[in-house]
Amino acid sequence: MIVHNDTIIGYGLAKTTDTLNWQQGLLLVKFDSSGNLLQHKLLLDSLGDHYTNGTYWGDIIATEDGGYALTAAAFYRNSAFLIKLKNDLEVEFIKEYNDTINLSTFNYRLLEIKNGYLLYGNIQRPNFVGNAFVQRVDKTGENRLVGA
């Protein structure tokens, strides 16, 4: 959860109500300072996996343009995600970072910097040892450098 100006943004998990093919997704809710619900959004993975977040992964920040950026992970695919939302919680982009070598890429934290974002945290290698990492991406989530 974050407090941004006079709004509260909640970020958590929810599942679809279809019990046959249920899917876990990311729930975003936006309240005003009096607790009135302004907007809500359930984000589901387009490939049918279950999005997940938790205490040590799944970060959300307010961005300079008035929107929000968040990180999440896929439950079955070994992927981490950077998701950029507009102020009304509509999706600007979802960028998936696949990792076919390491065991875990869940622990992605997020920091907005000039011309992009820093994704940082730790990755669990195949021998179960954790390593710290920092990855710089541009404002669209791509891995290209866009200036100093």
Image (tube, rainbow, N blue to C red):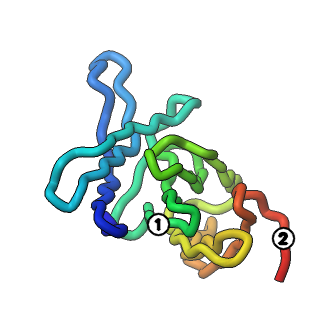
Q: Residue 54: which quarter of the image? A: bottom left
Residue under circle 1?
A: 62
Above-or-below relation of 37 to 82: above
- State the residue at coordinates (32%, 16%): 20
**In whole angstroms, how far apart are the C-alphas of marks 1 and 2?**
21 Å
As drawn, the label of residue 79 is: none
Q: Residue 140: which quarter of the image? A: bottom right
Answer with mark 1 or mark 2, whichever residue precedes in sequence. 1
Location of the N terminus by quadrant is bottom left
Q: Which element is circle 1 on?
A: strand
- Residue 96: x and y in percent read 65, 49
- Front residue of 46/90: it is 90
Q: Is residue 119 left or right of residue 72?
A: right
- Check the image and name the residue furthest to the top: 20
Q: Is residue 115 left or right of residue 145?
A: left
Residue under circle 2?
A: 146
Above-or-below relation of 97 to 65: above
**What amino acid type should be assigned to the residue bearing mark 2?**
Val
- Residue 65: x and y in percent read 57, 62
Q: Residue 137: which quarter of the image? A: bottom right
Q: Which element is circle 2 on?
A: loop
> Is any atom of residue 71 visible in this view?
no
- Front residue of 12/28: it is 28
Q: Residues within 10 Å of mark 1 (few under 14, many from 20)?
A: many
Question: Answer yes or no: do the residues labelled 1 and 2 have beta carbons within 8 Å?
Answer: no
- State the residue at coordinates (52%, 59%): 69
- Front residue of 58/114: it is 114
